[in-house]
Amino acid sequence: MDGMSDQGCDSIEKLKAQLPKMEQELKDQGKFKDFYQFTFNFAKNPGQKGLGAWPVLIDDFVEFARPHIGTKSTAV
């Protein structure tokens, strides 16, 4: 996925209109893995190697993404 401006999203309404396309893109395992890695690295503090306990945000994302990627595994 590209940045919001690259997606043509300069308003909340346009972002909402793009969500189905973005959800479709996450069905691609490579794109899902890239997005997951970005989210994981974004949640860490500089120099931190892991998150310890998974933040609620990531748990919620995995629950959201599971039906869209067709797997019950959270391993990436």
Image (spheres, rainbow, N blue to C red):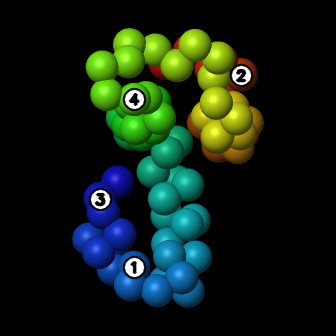
CA–CA distance between discs 2 and 3?
26 Å
Can you say which quadrant of the picture contains the N terminus? Answer: bottom left
* Residue identifier under label 2: 72
**Amino acid residing under circle 2:** Lys
Vertical order, 45 against 52 (above or below): below
For disc 2, the neighbor class at 10 Å (few under 14, some 14 to 19, many from 20) is: few
| Closest to the observer, 75 or 55 | 55
Give me the disc on residue 9: 1
> Which sits earlier in the primary sequence, circle 4 or circle 1?
1
Tell me the amino acid under the disc marked 3: Asp
**Local secondary structure at mark 2:** loop
Q: Position of residue 35 (x, y in %)?
A: 42, 40
Quick one: SS at disc 4? Answer: loop
The answer to which of 28 and 8 lies nearer the viewer is: 8
What's the CA distance linking mark 2 and mark 1?
A: 31 Å
Number of residues whose C-alpha sits closer than 10 Å to that of mark 3, classed few (under 14), some (14–19) or many (20 or more): few
Query: Which disc number belongs to residue 27?
Result: none
Q: Which residue is mark 3?
A: 2
Mark 4 vs mark 1, foreground winner is: 4
First-in-chain label (2 vs 1): 1
Q: Quadrant of residue 63?
A: top right
Q: Residue at x 58, y 13 (%)?
A: 52
Distance from label 2 to label 4 (Cα)?
A: 28 Å
Question: Quick check: 5 left or right of 44?
Answer: left
Labelled disc at residue 45: 4
Specify whether residue 30 is in view: no
Q: How many marks?
A: 4
Spatial distance from mark 3 to mark 4, Cα to Cα?
A: 23 Å
Whole-number angstrom distance, CA of label 4 to CA of label 1: 28 Å
The mark nearer the N terminus, 1 or 3, is: 3
